[in-house]
Amino acid sequence: MSLATVLLSGCSVFKDEPDSRVQRQQVTLDIPADLATPRQPGKYDIPQSDMAVGDVAETSPVLVLATASSSRITDESEKLARVMFERNDLTGDLIPFLQTQLTNYFSAQDIQIKATDDANLNFETGWIKRYRSEGFWLWQDEQQLDEARYTISIEPRPHGRTAIMSVSLLEHRFFDKQAQLTKAAARDSEVKLLNSLINQVAVSEIETAVANRDRVPEVDLEPGLNSAGEPAFITPQSIDVTWSQLEPVFEQLNFTVNDINRSAFTYYVSYSKPGRGMWATMMGREAPPVLPIADSDYQIVLQRSAEGTVINLLTKEGKPLAADVIVAAYDPFVAAIRAAKVEL
């Protein structure tokens, strides 16, 4: 067989074979008059409906956006404009916090709001207006499209840690036929207002967090005497709280913790006077607090008292430091507490 013959025969190998599958076609049977018509499958038949034709939204529904750290989406948020708020460190007492945020938001928008119950949990807003800009530049004009009033309710749970906030459209007036609200558009307008209120809460939380970060902690630590009449520091905090907050203070004072005895509330530490680095000097940073004690090993022992907690500064042998040393160490301790941003 020649090479040409092989090449020609090889073409048939790559040739598309015809589709051998039988094309199914619907066959209509001619049924004699004296025979019954066989049942036809009705699996995909569209049933008749007497329901009225409703409006279909042209855009996706507006979603409830839980942007505040205290806010949570509820199960009904797809149908209703509502959100759950939880008490946290940034909100404090939840209900007064939410009432304040409502007042602040509508005051900033120059919109009236009034409580409709004695507990200040249900509110009605004044008219909230929408405008459309028409024209160009100097000839631009604002045309009012519509205005609406809403009800806002706060539903606290019995435990007081959570509350549901809901927004409902109370009344709507339109001046442009295109501004007439469908049922879906009314729900969207409720959610938009609710999202604005959630954002108000979120901004307030951020402001509180920044203020807490920059706030100089109040120091309640005072020089005093322990039950044995020996000089020590006294804080109104409980012994467990004091124990949990001392290590950041040690870092500021340049103490090194060598060992601890949690059952006896005792720290075994080493002290060395901190030096101020070159970069800290160039950057103008404050010098670290320096204690009026020698570089050595010490014990710091906590004791319960009627006033809170006694902090004893002892030598490595367990002897109390002199009264004048405790008095001189007070200011460095206060500076370290503020730098560590703890409450003692």
Image (cartoon, rainbow, N blue to C red):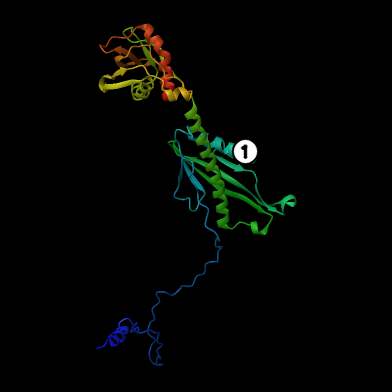
Between 267 and 4, the residue placed more toward the observer is 4
Q: Position of residue 240 (x, y in %)?
A: 33, 23
Q: Is residue 177 visible?
A: yes
For residue 118, which quarter of the picture? top right
Q: Residue at x 27, y 13 (%)?
A: 316
- 298 to 103, vertically: above or below: above
Q: Position of residue 294 (x, y in %)?
A: 33, 12
Q: Amino acid at mark 1?
A: Ala
Between 236 and 187, the residue placed more toward the observer is 236
Q: Tell me if 51 is positioned left or right of 260 in this view.
A: right
- 203 to 13, vertically: above or below: above
- Screen quadrant of the C terminus: top left
- 1 to 202, vertically: above or below: below
Q: Position of residue 115 (x, y in %)?
A: 59, 38
* Label 1 crowd (10 A; few <14 / some 14-19 / many >=20): few
Q: Is residue 342 visible?
A: no
Q: Residue at x 26, y 19 (%)?
A: 264
Please tell me whether mark 1 sits on a helix, a strand or a loop. helix
Q: Residue at x 74, y 50 (%)?
A: 138
Q: Which residue is mark 1?
A: 108
- Screen quadrant of the N terminus: bottom left
Q: How many marks?
A: 1
Between 289 and 249, the residue placed more toward the observer is 289
Q: Residue at x 38, y 90 (%)?
A: 35
Q: Position of residue 113 (x, y in %)?
A: 62, 40
For residue 29, which quarter of the picture? bottom left
- 88 to 242, vertically: above or below: below
Residue furthest out toward the right: 139
Q: Tell me if 337 is positioned left or right of 79 in this view.
A: left
Q: Tell me if 196 is positioned left or right of 318 in this view.
A: right
